[in-house]
């Protein structure tokens, strides 16, 4: 097993490069899963502002407006003195200052009260538009009841009840609106790291054995050509399985609940299928390189282009129709589609379309392997 031992020594020589890409992958996967989930949690939360109110109105409308603002915001007293007020706004102890003048209820009923409201906010701050929009909505509701002939006290009461109602949101595409698990984002970026590691790892080994002097010495050795290739193939298979097993072990440690589910098992199979495709791409790439720098360039070209065009780094919904059509000729596109469809599956009986996507990726693997054989045969003829 001399050839296999050399295979292991060459891969061990490049372990530092593999570790760098593993760290990058983990950082991207974990950071993206946490940031996206946090943004989904916060997306529909109400914003609570610190509003300083001075109510000089003795009528029902002034009290009702303060009560309404208190429901969504923190009501504070206006600091005494101009300098104290400026300091409070500068240090963000107060977001907005509202002064409700005397006789505001009577003047608003007469149609001129809204113009008498005095509001102050930090210049350029978005809080002014937020709180002013709340005030405008409340006053518009009160004005509607007053126009219908209802007295101010009753209009304030009805408006308060109306403003407590919340609109029900229904998504047009319910499945797409459901939050995705952290395991989804872990497997989302697998094509990038698998392509880099396979091209650098397997490519470095294959390039070593394809060296002109080493190849000539191997041909003169007592070991047959068949035995040499069997050991190289065995090394490639074990390297591919080792990379796959390493990432699945990380996935199990980070997302144990997900990995023990149907989605986790299907995602693992999806990653295994793509690892085979990545190994075939590595075999194809090594036919065109003569040095390690060239291999590094090809690993970046294939991993980044396949990741961006295939929907790994950029969501497919953000791509134009033409780009999406072109992406169908990239194996990572079908991997990403399978990764999304897996999240909708509740039983293996529903995974029929996912098995077809696995098959498409395997066809790409066969195509790259055959293309590599063709290029290799053409190069041997020209030697």
Image (cartoon, rainbow, N blue to C red):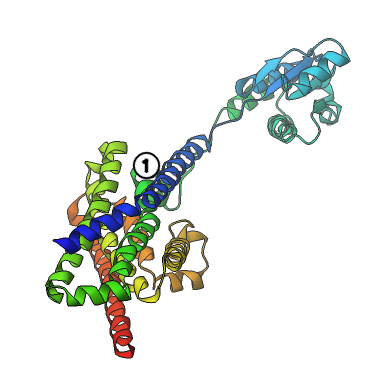
**In this view of the protein, can residue 161 be seen by the observer?**
yes
Instruction: Give 27 or 234, whichever is nearer the viewer.
Output: 234
Q: Quadrant of residue 142?
A: top right
Give the image location of residue 185, x and y in percent. Answer: 39, 47
**Quick one: quadrant of the C terminus?**
bottom left
Q: Which residue is mark 1?
A: 182
| Neighbourhood count class around disc 1 (C-alpha, 10 Å): few under 14, some 14–19, many 20 upward | some
Q: Decide: is 255 above or below 285.
A: above
Asked whether, in this view, residue 299 is left or right of residue 115, the answer is left
Is 71 in front, or is 43? 43
Please state if 139 lies on the left or on the right of 337 as rendered: right
Viewer-proximal residue among 373 and 1: 1
The front one of 359 and 340 is: 359
Position above or below: 5 against 124: below
On the image, which quarter does residue 69 sit in?
top right
Measuring 44% from the left and 61% from the top, which residue is drawn there? Answer: 307
- Using residue 4 as the reference point, say whether residue 13 is left or right of it: right
Kindly give the residue lying farthest to the bottom in the view shown.
Answer: 382
Would residue 351 be visible to someone looking at this image?
A: no
Label 1 secondary element? helix
Instruction: Indicate the position of residue 248 as horizontal and vertical percent values.
Output: 26, 46
What residue sits 33% from the left and 85% below the top?
Answer: 379
x and y, in percent, of residue 347 in the image: 20, 50
The answer to which image quadrant residue 299 occupies is: bottom left
Residue 207 in percent (x, y) is at 33, 69
Q: Number of numbered discs present?
A: 1
From the image, which quarter does the N terminus lie in? bottom left
Q: Residue furthest right?
A: 82
């Amino acid at each position: 097993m001399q050839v296999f031992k050399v295979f292991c020594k060459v891969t061990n020589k490049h372990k530092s490069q593999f570790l760098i890409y593993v760290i990058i992958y983990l950082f991207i996967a974990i950071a993206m899963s946490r940031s996206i989930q946090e943004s989904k949690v916060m997306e529909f939360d109400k914003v609570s502002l610190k509003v300083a109110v001075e109510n000089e109105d003795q009528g029902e409308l002034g009290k009702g407006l303060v009560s309404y603002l208190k429901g969504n915001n923190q009501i504070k007293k206006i600091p005494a003195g101009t300098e104290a007020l400026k300091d409070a706004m500068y240090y963000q102890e107060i977001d907005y200052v509202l002064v409700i003048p005397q006789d505001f209820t009577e003047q608003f009923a007469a149609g001129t009260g809204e113009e008498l409201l005095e509001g102050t906010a930090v210049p350029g701050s978005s809080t002014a538009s937020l709180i002013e929009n709340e005030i405008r909505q409340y006053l518009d509701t009160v004005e509607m009841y007053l126009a219908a002939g209802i007295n101010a006290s009753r209009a304030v009461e009805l408006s308060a009840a109306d403003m407590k109602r919340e609109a029900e949101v229904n998504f047009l595409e319910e499945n797409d609106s459901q939050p995705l698990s952290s395991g989804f984002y872990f497997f989302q970026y697998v094509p990038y790291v698998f392509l880099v590691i396979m091209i650098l790892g397997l490519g470095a080994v294959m390039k070593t054995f394809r060296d002109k002097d080493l190849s000539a010495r191997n041909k003169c050795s007592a070991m047959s050509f068949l035995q040499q290739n069997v050991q190289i193939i065995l090394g490639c298979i074990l390297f591919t399985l080792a990379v796959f097993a390493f990432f699945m072990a990380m996935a199990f440690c980070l997302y144990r609940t997900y990995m023990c589910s149907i989605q986790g098992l299907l995602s693992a199979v999806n990653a295994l299928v793509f690892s085979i495709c990545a190994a075939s791409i590595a075999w194809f790439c090594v036919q065109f390189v003569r040095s390690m720098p060239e291999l590094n360039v090809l690993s970046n070209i294939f991993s980044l282009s396949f990741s961006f065009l295939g929907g790994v780094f950029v969501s497919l919904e953000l791509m134009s129709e033409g780009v999406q059509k072109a992406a169908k000729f990239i194996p990572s596109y079908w991997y990403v589609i399978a990764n999304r469809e897996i999240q909708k599956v509740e039983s293996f009986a529903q995974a029929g379309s996912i098995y077809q996507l696995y098959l498409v990726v395997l066809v790409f693997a066969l195509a790259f392997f055959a293309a590599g054989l063709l290029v290799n045969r053409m190069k041997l003829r020209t030697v």
